[in-house]
Amino acid sequence: MKFGYFDDSAREYVITRPDTPLPWINYLGCEAYFGLISNTAGGYSFYKDARLRRLTRYRYNNAPLDMGGRYLYLRDNANGKYWSPTWMPTRGTLDEYECRHGQGYTIITSKSNGIKSSIRYFVPLGESLEIWQATLTNERDSDTDLSLFSAIEFCLWDANDDATNFQRNYSIGQVEIAPLAPNGRGAGGEGLTVIYHKTEYRERRDHFAYFACSEQLTGFDTIREDFLGAYRGWHEPQVVERGQSVNTEAHGWQPIGSHHVKVQLKAGEQKQIIFVLGYHENSKDEKFDPPDSQLLNKKTVKPIIEKYLKPEHADKAFDELRDYWTMLLGKLQVITPDEHTNRMVNIWNAYQCMVTFNMSRSASYFESGIGRGMGFRDSNQDLLGFVHMIPERARERILDIAATQLKNGGAFHQYQPLTKRGNNDIGSGFNDDPLWLVLGVAAYIKESGDWSILDEQVQYENEQGSESQLYEHLQRSLQYTLDRLGPNKLPLIGRADWNDCLNLNCFSDTPGQSFQTTTNKDGKVAESVFIAGLFILACQEMAGIAEHYHDQAEVNKVRKAAADMEETVWEAGWDDDWFRRAYDDYGHPLGSKENTEGKIFIEPQGICVMAGLGVENGNAVKALDSVAEHLATPHGIVLQQPAFSKYYLHLGEISSYPPGYKENAGIFCHNNPWVMIAETVVRRGDKAFDYFKRINPSAREEISELHKCEPYVYAQMIAGKDAATHGEAKNSWLTGTAAWNYVAITQYILGIRPAFDGLEVKPVLPSGWDSFEAVRNFQGVRYEISVKREGAGNKVTLEVDDRSIEGTVIPRPKDGIKTVKVKAVIRS
Ligand code: BGC
Ligand code: NOJ
């Protein structure tokens, strides 16, 4: 069953009923001011940091779901009937309802009691505010007298403190209600009133929030309990019921912002009303106006508010936002025979990659915005999906990440986005972490052709004086693995590798202990075959980098290291039909026929074949056939089999999950694409594409009732075959799944991938595809690519501007050439 449809030409997903299985969310903002918004206007906003600068409240795991949002109420003053034009929070029946999620904006349209309403929510580029553009149309054949109420609940900035420290917080809330123009006069803002939220501004904060409306107010409220009425919820505010605000000023307790506007509409008449919610900072020495008062200095914020309360400025800002996304998404556009591929590549998957750039793992419906910092491993992988859209920002991101690297080549597992420093609470010792930096840097150089990044002087552990060239950071990353080999000469796993839940040194028997940071073993025995595969892959990238860097000694060194590691994998990491996963602290293999549970894992099959292992001796195909036999399900490939039926002290968190969920044999959508890519390495396009389709959210739209999460973005996990809810997705939006699926489909199946020497075109397509077209903007040149199948195999020949070339990498065109036409022919 579906709850909406894709409107590809508008680049929107259109939700046609409000009661989706879960709130189906979208993101507002793409620079500093951000918000989450659901299809019923739930969600919250923050400035830069979802924990420390949260503007509005939201209640996770609440009943009903999705409480807290950007709410409006409409009231028919003739009979007292009221409703929410976004369905929540009053629910009830709407005669029409539609929510359009686009890139950085959401439009919710509905009709009730003959009144049509359409609210467009978005954040203008370059501003720290959000606009709600509400258009009301009287579709009755008589005049109406309406009241419109807005409602938000302010968060007292630190979301964690706000949700826990009530003894203080119930006494500190402060607001100011003030005319936009002094004494009600002035340029544009005559008679308008703004609600300011200024909790803690009196002391160390120099920022505040504001909530403004384009209309003269009939009233306002800022005390929650007076607005709602005692013991009432947001679904039946007393003020709305009565049809009159009480003009309250909050002192402590729970400050809110609510405007009351009277709207008289003649039959057929339409009116636009704009709300602006924003964040503003003043300089420390100009906080107050007059200076010796406690009143906010509003001099610099007023012009901003005035501007965006005007429809022409709001419209212009919206058009600029649309153009910005057209530009970003325009970096790669494809037309293939498969609509699910087209819309994921052209719109949604690329958009999700940008959201992971902005949010990392901080704020989603599953990430509360108060928890995790930016992962070292996550950030490097996210980069693979957004580097082509914003190479300059990818560069900055790489330098930030690298500056947290430890001197021994290791990595803080996480760093904090505001301070950009490594996070001491979690520390280091996730032994795969540093290797991802090599992959991230390689991807950046291939995309941008900017070799100068290697010469950047970058600190270690953010310590002044510790700088070395970024190039040396990469060398140290690889050395970190070589310095930590175990009894079988495989890399020691440390706290965990990519699989955060495979905690082979943890041995935790105490409830509540973190599996990731508890270590009861010295870590000298447990080894990871996955890291071995990743190491070989990273060595290959490093060899490419070193070659161009004219460092032949390094090329030789990493090639030898990779060859030695490969030999070790065949000796200790191969299990007849597939790659083993690890060795535990007792020195026993895991992911082996010797095990009764966890006999085969997905990660080493994917990563080792991606690194080219077994392509020549046939083991790659064997390993992938084993994946198909033991791990593949119609909903995707599960992480391992058989699932762990109980908690194993020596395995850690992986066995803490009930079978079929998360890392215990769930379908981890992050590593499915490794198998897709591996299938392209052994040139099996049908299999690669089949796996791509199984987890493609658009292709799963028809089973939305089961899938539950949004059909336009990937989820981290789909419940595996051992689960009671096989096929049900969780943890949508913020996941490495976005980047890796994007890489798998665009770079390996469609085969358009940046290489060190230029753009490579080397598709491995499903046999049923005769052709596809693509436009790729790469290093300032527009590549117009057409691919045709003339034979059943995978042999690709290229003609560039009508001339055949050797191989599959298109040499860089002469300076000044801005468009290149590429014809790729696939033969047997
Ligand atoms: C989750 C992992 C996650 C880890 C670290 C675990 O509980 O299952 O997917 O990476 O926590 O936050
Ligand atoms: C989520 C983490 O963010 C990612 O780094 C990890 O690899 C997966 N979980 C698997 O455990």
Image (cartoon, rainbow, N blue to C red):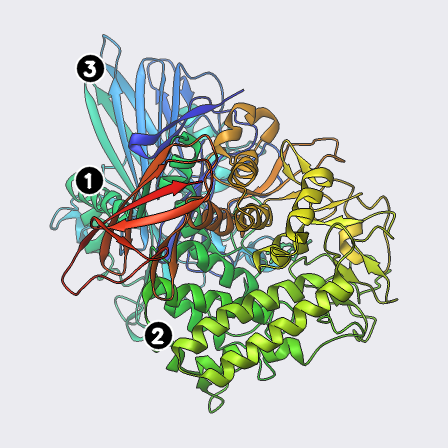
Give the SS element for disc 1: helix
Within 10 Å of the Cα at label 1, are there few (<14), some (14-19), or many (20+) other Cα atoms? some
Q: Position of residue 771 (x, y in %)?
A: 35, 35
Cα separation, mark 1 vs mark 2, equals 41 Å
**Of the pair 622 and 733, the residue shown nearer to us:** 622
Indicate the quadrant of ligand 1 in the picture.
Answer: bottom right
Q: Residue at x 47, y 32 (%)?
A: 698
Left or right: residue 534 versus residue 404 is right
Cα separation, mark 1 vs mark 3, equals 22 Å
Amino acid type shown at disc 1: Asp
Q: Which mark is residue 40?
A: none
Q: Position of residue 82 (x, y in %)?
A: 41, 21
Q: Position of residue 269 (x, y in %)?
A: 19, 19
Q: Considering only order in the chain, which callout, 3 or 1, is on the residue closer to the N terminus? A: 3
**Of the pair 553 and 600, the residue shown nearer to us:** 553
Q: Are marks 1 and 2 in contact (CB under 8 Å)?
A: no
Q: Residue at x 76, y 46 (%)?
A: 657
Indicate which label's residue lies in the foreground, 1 or 2: 2
Q: Which mark is residue 268?
A: 3
Give the SS element for disc 3: loop
Q: Position of residue 676 (x, y in %)?
A: 55, 45
Q: Considering only order in the chain, which callout, 2 or 1, is on the residue closer to the N terminus? A: 1
Q: Which mark is residue 315?
A: 1
Q: Considering only order in the chain, which callout, 2 or 3, is on the residue closer to the N terminus? A: 3
Q: Are marks 1 and 3 in contact (CB under 8 Å)?
A: no
Mark 2, residue position: 451
